[in-house]
Image: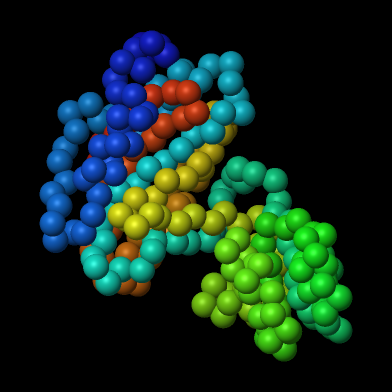
Amino acid sequence: MFTAKRAASLITARSTINIVQQTAGYASKKVVKVNPNALDLHEAIRVIKAAEVGRPQHQLEMHVQCKIEKSTPPIRGSIILPRNVKQEATILVFAEGKKAEEARAAGATYVGGHELIEQVKNGDLKFDKCLSTPDMLPAVAKIARILGPKGLMPTLKKGTVTEDILTTVQKSKGSFDFKGDKNGVLHTGFARVSFTPEEIEANLKAILDEVKAFGKAHSLKGVIRNVVLSSTRGPGIHISGSQQL
């Protein structure tokens, strides 16, 4: 039976993550190697939970090495996880009239037009996500230098400029966003130690399915190359059969 001490001896989180980063890169230049210490997903979850006994709020993290090409844009996605990891997001919506009413009905925290722009400019509001109706976008563009660096500027490409405010607010409140680094490695927390093994696996696979969809959209066959799981204070563990998850 695995103990926390035995789990830690397998491989440390830091060294494992370094391995992922060192082997990441463009698909045409790298070869995926099989790690002899890899565990199947169920066993890896059991080991990590054993290493984190007494720390139910500690986070489980996934580090996914993806196949990328020079022309591949940053890997990113937004989904609703089967088991939410964090509290609902604070949503700000730039809208007026009927669309503003829809935003409030959907549960947006801040809703308004030009007066809201002034509040954002003055730093009076704290929020996690920002949406806008198309007609408000020209006015919102005036504070792009404030929203942009924080990744909050509404854009058509991200789906945060929309007429369907009601649905978008509802999805945004519980959505989970992720983004890979320039080497095609995705690092993100995705569950807590207190979650059941089934909930941990469901969240993991939901994110991997979204990564696969990204790969398919950009003609990247077998986009997932390696998956490593770790936790706040536990070991980092390579997952066997990562490409088949």
Q: Position of residue 167 (x, y in %)?
A: 69, 71
Task: Give the left or right position of residue 236, taking residue 53 as reference.
Answer: left
Above or below, comparing residue 220 to residue 23 in the picture? below
Q: Residue at x 50, y 41 (%)?
A: 189
Task: Give the left or right position of residue 157, taking residue 95 as reference.
Answer: left
Residue 202 seen in the figure: no
Q: Residue at x 77, y 67 (%)?
A: 120
Tell me where residue 7 sits by quadrant: top left
Above or below, comparing residue 73 to residue 16 in the picture? below
Task: Give the left or right position of residue 176, taking residue 185 as reference.
Answer: right
Residue 76 seen in the figure: yes
Tell me where residue 107 sits by quadrant: bottom right
- In this view, the residue in front, 138 or 12, is 138
What quarter of the picture does the N terminus occupy? top left
Above or below, comparing residue 186 to residue 133 in the picture? above
Q: Residue at x 54, y 56 (%)?
A: 177
Q: Position of residue 2 (x, y in %)?
A: 37, 14
Q: Position of residue 68 (x, y in %)?
A: 26, 61
Above or below, comparing residue 31 to residue 135 in the picture? above
Count of marks, rendered view: 0
Its colouring scheme is: rainbow
Tell me where residue 104 sits by quadrant: bottom right
